[in-house]
Image (cartoon, rainbow, N blue to C red):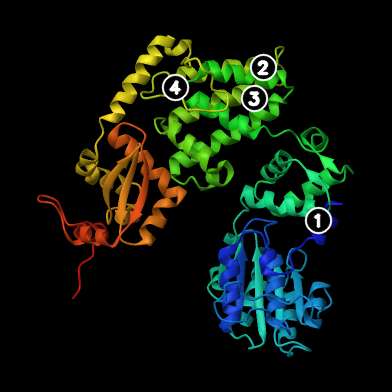
Amino acid sequence: MSTTLYRKYRPQKFSEVVDQNHIKVTLQNEIATGKLAHAYLFSGPRGIGKTTIARILAKALNCQNLQGAEPLAVSGVEPCDQCASCVEIRDGRSLDLVEIDAASNRGINEIRELREQTKYTPLKEKYKVFIIDEAHMLTTEAFNALLKTLEEPPAYAIFILATTEIHKIPETIISRCQRFDFKKVPVRSAMAHLAEIAQKEQIQIDERVLENIARSSEGYLRDAVSLLGQVLSLGEKEINEQAAALVLPRSDWHKVMELIVLLLSGQTKEALLLVDQLFEEGVDLEHFAKITVETWRKILLAKMTGDWQELAWEAGEDWLKKLVEVSQRLAGPDLVKIMEIFLEALNGLHQALIVQLPLEVAIVKIAEVTAGLSGLKPVKTSTDKKEPPVGGSAAGQTSDQTKSQANSSAAGQTTLKIELIQSKWPEVIEALRSHNHSLAAFLQVGRPIELRDQTIVVGFQYNFHYDRLKESKYLAIIQDVLARVFGQPLSITGQINKQFSENIFSAKPGEKKMVDQVLETFGGEVIG
């Protein structure tokens, strides 16, 4: 049923493709303006729409009743999906659409045959479209033969190469194609698509089940639809978590995030209670531990590279903010030690006489790792209790001591003033420069203008700079630097106003002008 379900709801128009908006809009505008490339290269993970968009592009190029053909139309151009050309392509009967699976047709003879086909004009349509799937599987000789065709293509021939391993495509081929990089589908987008399919199938399905499917598929939409097909094969008109558990393992992803946040904020007691709760609910603790270890790995990579994009996709804005906050004071070696502790617990779960004991021991060991970190404070999660959290016996803290520390931390935060932030802003820029020169450059064209509830408001003249600031991979780096410079967690946001343009060419006494700072960063000069 999963294969049938995927084929049944395979997108036939650009608007039906989930996500990949940066690719759809560009292709639609090229079709509308007639400024087409003779070769396209679609790269990205499996099951996210490369071949699907290739076929939709072929339909749009030859559609006899193209919809919304005005340049830069708001809705974008779309194949009608009803004319003879669209129907033949949809049904796989078009003689002017040639699809080659390079995984099984990878030799020079197959490419020579393709070259022969390019010599003949389309039988019915305006364009003859060649789709080469799994293009990275072609042999070196086949690539050389294909290169000759790409160098001198006939005006009516359009080539679309799709690959999951872009690094295996020769640079000579890449340079002759217009390249599009496909991204994994975010959880929320996948959930919306699955919900739409379930509605069309007249099945009521619990939102937690949809989320479990979306997360289990890890951004591969085709896998998500296949998993949905397995769930729908249960034959129920209403599917809840209990019913879906017959097919899908229970995710408890939110509990994984909650446990990590509790551990990194020093809330050992609450972490132990959470594991006990999971055991009482019959959760598969081994599966839970595997997900936790994988999440630790992603946090470590994000911490080391400054790129939180994968976690942003997986965690969502709320959880990502908590993860960034609690991991600010952890160094790489600390995270490695924590991962090793959890891996040891995962191995111990196989033969544990007391099922939850390996995880409980791991939590206590992690408390020893985090005990020496300064500035730890509780982060609100769904398991927070009214009594003050205890940092664990390893931290040697009583509840009264925890209160005193919380009060001291709060008092320290209230002493921070915007004037201090402005005076230390050059330190922030300099610290950022060690991470990323361009990041430091775009941030220093603005100036801190206000402090609102531990959030620094930076004034910018243009939306471009503010948009860069909002990107999660940059936001995480900036917040990490702010915490180190000012000694406490701080968020950052922006405000757009033309008056901030003055900051670029003016400076307070003793300060460099911001334009001079930018020029210094990139080694440039003002011309004219």
**Element under disc 3:** helix
Q: Which label number is shown at residue 370?
A: 4
Q: Quadrant of the C terminus?
A: bottom left
Whichever of labels 2 and 3 marks the residue nearer the N terminus, that label is 3
Amino acid type, callout 3: Leu
Q: Which residue is mark 1?
A: 200
Query: Label 2 belongs to which residue?
Result: 356
Distance between mark 4 and mark 1 Cα atoms: 50 Å
Element under disc 4: helix
The answer for how far apart the CA atoms under marks 1 and 3 are is 41 Å
Query: What is the CA distance from the residue labelled 3 to the residue labelled 4?
Result: 20 Å
Q: In which image quadrant can residue 133 be found?
A: bottom right
Query: Is residue 317 shown above or below 326?
Result: below
Q: Is residue 12 left or right of residue 485?
A: right
The residue labelled by disc 3 is 346
- Asked if the residues shown at circle 4 and circle 2 are in contact, with their CB atoms under 8 angstroms apart, the answer is no
Viewer-proximal residue among 416 and 479? 416
Question: Which label lies toward us, 1 or 3?
Answer: 1
Camera-nearest residue between 91 and 520: 91
Marked residue nearer the N-terminal end (3 or 4): 3
